[in-house]
């Protein structure tokens, strides 16, 4: 029996075996040139849910926290088309309620530290800023 390293696979097609693996450059997903040139941004994700109405309620609560309870010395999010520091990002099946985007991980971590008392499960997520200024 032939044993192959986990990085190498064997494809049999039409009776002909073809060895695939690291020798042909299988390195996983590649980023595009546009992604590499698009600046990275960071969000503080405070809630994830499959329920859109619940996400909208959470958005209102997070916005209230930001406007009323968040310390005034926190970093401000980058300007976006939506004009709000809180948004809902939907990637099936989850709605993600996020603060941001922030220009650096350090800014997002500062906001995260302040939000943790009210949102203990919050965490920082990286993203890319689109050409229009919005973030995914």
Image (cartoon, rainbow, N blue to C red):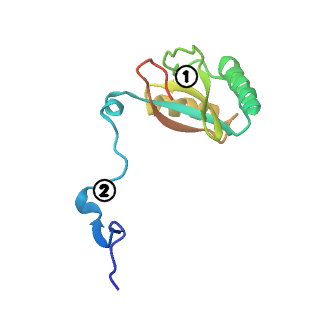
Q: Position of residue 134 (x, y in %)?
A: 49, 21
At 51% across and 25% down in the image, what residue appears? 101
Label 2 to label 1, Cα distance in Å? 43 Å
Of 108 and 37, nearer the camera is: 37
- In front: label 2 or label 1: 2
Q: Is 133 displayed left or right of 69 in the figure?
A: left
Which secondary structure lies at badge 1? loop
The image quadrant of residue 24 is bottom left
**Among all residues in the image, which is located at the extreme bottom?**
1
**Where does the image place residue 78, in percent across and percent down from the top left?**
48, 19
Nearest the viewer among 112 and 45 is 45
Outermost residue on the left side: it is: 23
Judging by the rendered image, the residue that carries numbered circle 2 is 26
Classed neighbour count for the residue bearing mark 1: other residues with Cα under 10 Å, few (<14), some (14–19), many (≥20): some
**Residue that appears at 69% across and 23% down:** 65
User: Mark 1 highlights which residue?
Assistant: 74
Query: Would you say the residues marked 2 and 1 are in contact, meaning their CB atoms lie under 8 Å apart?
Result: no
Q: Around disc 2, counting alpha carbons within 10 Å, would you say few (fewer than 14), some (14 to 19), or many (20 or more)?
A: few
Residue 59 point in image, percent of width and height = 69, 26
Numbered circles on residues, count? 2
Where is residue 100 drawn, in percent x and y? 54, 25
* Label of residue 49 in the image: none
Sequence order check, earlier mark of 2 and 1: 2
For this view, does 110 lie left or right of residue 60? left
Residue 74 vs 14, above or below: the answer is above
Q: Secondary structure at mark 2?
A: loop
Specify whether 67 is left or right of 91. Answer: right
Q: Which of the image's four quarters has the N terminus?
A: bottom left
């Amino acid at each position: 029996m032939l044993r192959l390293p986990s990085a190498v696979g064997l494809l049999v097609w039409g009776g002909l075996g073809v060895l695939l693996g690291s020798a042909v450059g299988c390195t996983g997903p590649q980023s595009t040139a546009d992604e590499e040139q698009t600046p990275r941004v960071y969000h503080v994700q405070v809630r994830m849910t499959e329920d859109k109405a619940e996400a909208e309620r959470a958005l209102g609560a997070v916005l209230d926290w930001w406007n009323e309870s968040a310390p005034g010395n926190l970093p401000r999010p980058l300007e976006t088309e939506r004009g709000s520091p809180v948004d809902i990002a939907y990637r099936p099946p989850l709605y993600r309620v996020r603060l941001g985007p922030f220009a650096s991980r350090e800014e997002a971590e500062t906001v995260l530290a302040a939000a943790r008392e009210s949102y203990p499960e919050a965490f920082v997520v990286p993203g890319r800023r689109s050409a229009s200024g919005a973030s995914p």
